[in-house]
Image (spheres, rainbow, N blue to C red):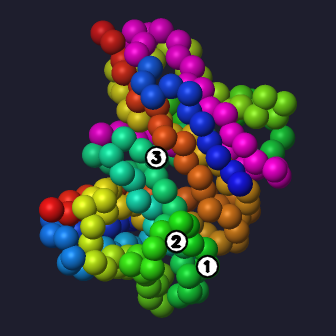
Amino acid sequence: AQSVTQLDSQVPVFEEAPVELRCNYSSSVSVYLFWYVQYPNQGLQLLLKYLSGSTLVKGINGFEAEFNKSQTSFHLRKPSVHISDTAEYFCAVSEGRDDKIIFGKGTRLHILP
Amino acid sequence: DAGVTQSPTHLIKTRGQQVTLRCSPKSGHDTVSWYQQALGQGPQFIFQYYEEEERQRGNFPDRFSGHQFPNYSSELNVNALLLGDSALYLCASSLRVTAYNEQFFGPGTRLTVL
């Protein structure tokens, strides 16, 4: 069965500093991987997705993630964060079109002034 | 282009009551999925509807049921409410022919069970 582990429940980082949010997954087959962002009192918005091909995926708002099959990881990175990046970030996995999406428990990104 | 809409925004019920939540998918989408997001947790898949039928179901009891209408909108019904049903209920829509099942989420309905 699929599962997603987000290793940090909260990550504090100073404004304009780089950040990495960690995500590991388990699955017995090829997967599609996603990062979603949830701003306070809002639904989820897709940041980026890995479907196949290049292991480095670029998304919206300057975020990128790298798929590492051998380590079953899909860490999210941003070189310089802004106060507006304050949100909850969810890593998710799906085994395909006919499969449900499994979410991690989320990482709260807290930007320090 | 309207995105996914959900109603109501907030709802307060008491234990044992029944509730119906509603979702209108993004224009052009034909598949609706429902998720429960408890406080401090990630969304958990409840079920998915396509062509007015339940296609997949997560690990939720039969108290949770749904429906999809010919216009692709959907309802989530929860019977015999428990305190533990208090959560944010998210609806997501997608287009089934899309290979990777990209889902677009609505803002959610916050259900509080007292």
Q: Which residue sits at x=76%, y=34%?
A: A72
Q: Which residue is mark 1?
A: B55
Q: Which residue is mark 3?
A: B42
Q: Disc 1 residue type?
A: Arg
Q: Earlier in the sequence, mark 3 or mark 2?
A: 3
**Whole-Å distance between the Cαs marked 2 and 1?**
7 Å
Residue A19, horizontal then vertical, whole percent: 53, 17
Q: Inspect the magenta stretch and tell me whether residue A13 lies in it.
A: yes
Q: Are marks 3 and 1 in contact (CB under 8 Å)?
A: no
Q: Inspect the magenta stretch and tell me whether residue A35 lies in it.
A: yes
Tag 3 and tag 2 share a subunit: yes
Q: Are marks 3 and 2 in contact (CB under 8 Å)?
A: no
Q: Earlier in the sequence, mark 2 or mark 1?
A: 2
Q: Which residue sits at x=72%, y=43%?
A: A26
Q: Which residue sits at x=81%, y=45%?
A: A52
Q: Are marks 2 and 1 in contact (CB under 8 Å)?
A: yes
Q: Which residue is mark 2?
A: B47
Q: Which residues are magenta?
A: A12-40
Residue A36, horizontal then vertical, whole percent: 51, 43
